[in-house]
Amino acid sequence: MLAGILLFGCARHHEISKNQYDSAYHKPLNSPGEKFAGLPPAVQNTIRAETGSAVIEDILKDTSSGLVVYRVDFVNSNLWPPLFIARDGSVLNPDLTVAVGAGDDAIGVSKGSAISLKPSDLPPNVMKVIQERAPNSEIAWIHKEVHSDRDIYIVSFKDPVQPILSIAGDGTVMSHLH
């Protein structure tokens, strides 16, 4: 009976300590660094230019205004108030008016250089073509280019047999590349 009490006592103590350990962590598995890496290059450049190496607390993407706006909050909020940035890298006031326009580099990005995207950034027509042409392939990367005022999405797959697709914003397949 004494052995049973000792065994129960040890098991109970272990159970309490395990529950305390499991409940100590409840934040999502993403970090400001991960969020920063997922930002468009023009937004990353603006953050670096405006704040240098200020420690980022959080980055939020907001589309409620009809525009894509990134809000960057910093650990030292007394020194660094929230920074609002448009997708092209322009610094915005809290009322979303332009405080500092995007530089020449950001303008170049919107007129021909490649912009990296996620599948969730794609127009529905482009995603439909990808699902039809490569239903079982995992996307490696997506770049958006603008040619003659036409958005072109270049999609590469992790499967080397699957050709790279070049798709216009309306879903027209432009070319197949290997």
Image (spheres, rainbow, N blue to C red):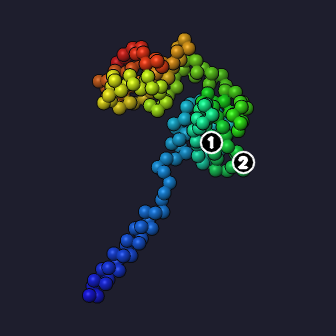
Q: Nearer the viewer, residue 36 or 15?
A: 15
Q: CA distance from mark 2 to mark 1?
A: 13 Å
Q: Quadrant of the N terminus?
A: bottom left
Q: Position of 125 compared to 89: left or right?
A: left
Above or below for 38 versus 155: below
Residue under the image location 61 percent in, 27 percent down: 88
Q: Position of residue 138 (x, y in %)?
A: 35, 32
In contact (CB < 8 Å): disc 2 and disc 1? no
Q: Nearer the viewer, residue 169 or 103?
A: 169
Q: Quadrant of the C terminus?
A: top left
Residue under the image location 66 percent in, 30 percent down: 90
Q: Which numbered tag is attached to residue 72?
A: 1
> Looking at numbered disc 2 in the image, what kind of residue is underneath it?
Leu
* Figure quadrant of residue 15: bottom left
Mark toward the start of the polypeptide (2 vs 1): 1
Characterize the local packing of mark 1: few (<14), some (14-19) or many (20 or more) Cα atoms within 10 angstroms.
many
Residue under the image location 53 percent in, 43 percent down: 33
Q: Position of residue 67 (x, y in %)?
A: 61, 31
> Looking at numbered disc 1 in the image, what kind of residue is underneath it?
Val
Residue under the image location 69 percent in, 34 percent down: 96
Q: Position of 12 compared to 24: left or right?
A: left
Q: Which residue is mark 2?
A: 79
Q: Closer to us: mark 2 or mark 1?
A: 1
Label 1 element class = strand
Q: Position of residue 24 (x, y in %)?
A: 48, 63
Q: What residue occupies the far top of the structure in this picture?
A: 148
Q: Position of residue 152 (x, y in %)?
A: 48, 18
Q: Position of 96 compared to 13: left or right?
A: right
* Figure quadrant of residue 141: top left
Label 2 element class = loop
